[in-house]
Image (cartoon, rainbow, N blue to C red):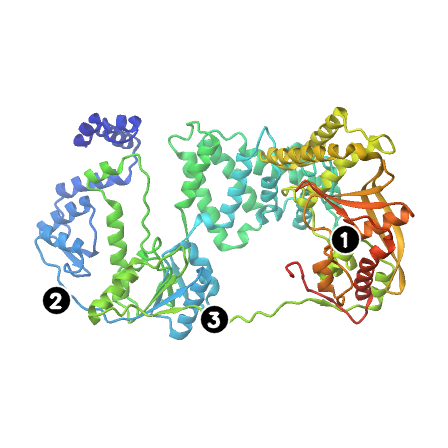
Amino acid sequence: LLSIQQNARIGYAVPESINGLLRNIKLLREAFHGELKDRGETCRGLQYLRASGEARRHGWEEFDEILFCNLFYFHRTEEDVVRHLYGLGKASLIFQGDQRKWPVLQRIAQRFGCELLEGAEPTPTSFRLQVQAGFDVHSQVAIVRDILAGIGDTSRTVVVVPDADHLVPLLSELPPEMSDINVSMGYPLRRSSLSFLLDFVMKAQLSRKSGRYYAKDYLKVLRHPFVKNLQLAGDAEALRAMVHAVEDILTGRTRTGISGSSFVSLEEVMAQEVIFQAAGAADRGAAAVSPSDLHRALELIHRIVFAGWEDVVDLKTFAEALGRFLDLVTEQGALGSFPLNVRIASCMYDIRDEFARACFNREPFAFEEIVRIFEDKLAREMVSFAGTPLRGLQVLGLFETRSLNFDNVIVLDANEGVLPRLEVRSSLVPREVMLSLKLDRLELEEEIQRYQFMRIISSAKNVYLVYQEREDKERSRFIEELSWEADKKAGRHVGLPVARAAFAVQIEPNRRVAEKTPAMLEFLRDFRYSASSVNLYLKNPYEFYTSYVLGLKETEDLLDEPDGRQIGTFLHELLQETFQPMLRRPFVLDDAFEQRLFRLCEEKFRATFARTMRSDAFLLKAVLDHRLKVFLEKEREGAAAVAEVLCLEQAFESRIRLAGSDLRFYCVLDRVDRLRDGTILLIDYKTGTSDRLPRKDFGLDVPLSRERIFRDLRSFQIPLYYYFLTREFPGECVRAELFNLRESKREAFPGTPVTSPEDFLQPYMQALDHVVSEILDPQVPFRDDDLKNYD
């Protein structure tokens, strides 16, 4: 330490603040140990220091002999104590291994002045080795299941699980008749459901802004099973109904003043009386729960699960908030019904107590720093399983196999990064300093884990090594070492045969089919068709069936990022409001029009997307502003030819003779202008690519089929709009344009002047008749036949 102090005065290649500590490291160590002694406390380093001194002052007369068994690696203090006892003739040391195979044993033999030999030659291994590769965790555990089935009697079998995260998938795959299973390893506390709930709670606090909670994080907490199943209102089902009512409001399924808001306050949620009325009135086959009971339940959840963390400033207040939270979920919830969850909660309480008793528990910290301390603590905690070590299949971690022998050894996750698992921990003390103190834990960890692995497989009759074979993973260096040993033994490259997991999968197309019933046909004859509904049938008849016959639609979530449909609706409504004052009036695109367009855009954006999006809302706004500027430029180029706007977002409905019946059709036209030359011009706004113009060469020269119509006609929208417009304005020149706002492109339909609209529309109407006839044909079921990629 004195040497380190001297070097620190010159300066290590570390920040000056750390050099300042290293220049006083001996003083800091003495002060730290002195403080521990004054408090009557200790730490690992101090225990080792005191043990090394006590060992030499003690006479050990009460012992005739002291046995040290299955030694492999000594800390220097341990070696000092053992060498002292060995020199007194009090200690006998028992090792497993040969110094010719293990450099660390050779070092020990030299220091103790003895030989650690198994015999004239190291004992050769004689186990039968099988190496198998899976492609993920679940294929690995399926391999282990099959291996165990082949072994039969598993009383002399161990499954070594180096990665504790994979313990539950393994136990889930074991057959139910295998009752005698001993698990002598811990399950990571951070993988528990309670830990995930606390993670949601912490994220809700970290994303809180100006006292308001980010709606998505708020809902994640409420929807967690440990929260929505609390027994707070006398009926857990009523509480679940209340949570779903909150979700419906925030996502927009039930519209209120806070629907779709990115951030909400707890007070705003509590003010939504519809939550408690709807949940309390829900028919659950039991006595109704009053809205006031539900109001108190949600208020309690808000106070403990959310507001209770807002005033956390140190470990003491964090421990108090954690204790209240744990009391709520353990005493009022179903967590105590599962034994493992009880142990998990007990571990959480221990962490609560440790934080509350910490000597620096009143030291102020930012909430983010406390969360990092808490998460680091969770990452190092394990929950123990109760087992029967003396019988049945043993499931152990690598270090739990010490000194144990088995006939059958199955090693899971034999991959680099897991076997061996070498963690480079960042430390206040630089690695250069640690090496000068001869504390190279990284190298020692690799040697210790290699020894434990080789020792357990060398004692077995049958060894099964299972690893994941993927692009981002490679098999363990220990397997490569065994492969190299096999090559040396054979005198040539033989490698290790690998059996790879394979699952026989027969994929049959899941073509859903709905036969047409008389009731369906009656419904379809009276159905009000549109271009969108016919287009959907073209694309996939089964989707037409689910959307229009069954009336099913995807649930809208206002908290999700806006999709193309929502943006399209926004732009259609914006342009309608902007052009409305111009209806049946002179068409003037002056500065006042431009100001109104962008003012309305700003107001509508704040009322819609700005509420539901976070910091990235400005990107969407910038794109919309750019598109609208380009749109305005295009409009001004042709403004002189426009006399007036005839209609905006106007609905038209009529009956069309198709498939031998007069069927109802309707459409909504975005905008219709009258040009100065008398032409009637339909303008249809598009923001995506789903609806396009038919191919110019579309005709009746080939037989009609749904596939051919989908490929060549593409969409009935513009032809139907043109049909309706020619009937609304008979004898006048009618044209249509598709205005793609995304690409700032206008396409005319038809491309050239038409003398007879009826003749021009004939192929399109015959194609429509073919599709509608198929819809009404009782012999043609609705088949799941998606043509979106049809060419």
Amino acid marked by disc 3: Glu
Is residue 279 positioned above or below 577 on the image?
below
Q: Which mark is residue 177?
A: 3
Q: Closer to the N terminus: mark 2 or mark 3?
A: 2
Query: Is 698 placed left or right of 402 in the picture?
Result: right
Query: Is 302 placed left or right of 652 in the picture?
Result: left
**Could you say where residue 208 lies in the image, as x and y percent from the top left?**
57, 33
**Could you say where residue 667 lies in the image, as x and y percent from the top left?**
83, 49
Q: Quadrant of the C terminus?
A: bottom right
Q: Which mark is residue 532?
A: 1
Amino acid marked by disc 1: Ser
C-alpha span from label 2 to label 3: 44 Å
Q: Closer to the N terminus: mark 1 or mark 2?
A: 2
* Badge 2 vs badge 3, beta-carbon distance below 8 Å: no
- Give the residue at x 55% y 35%: 207
Q: Quadrant of the N terminus?
A: top left
Instruction: Please state which of residues 374 and 644 is positioned toward the viewer in this rendering.
Output: 644
Task: Residue lying at the far right in this picture: please name it.
Answer: 731
C-alpha span from label 3 to label 1: 56 Å
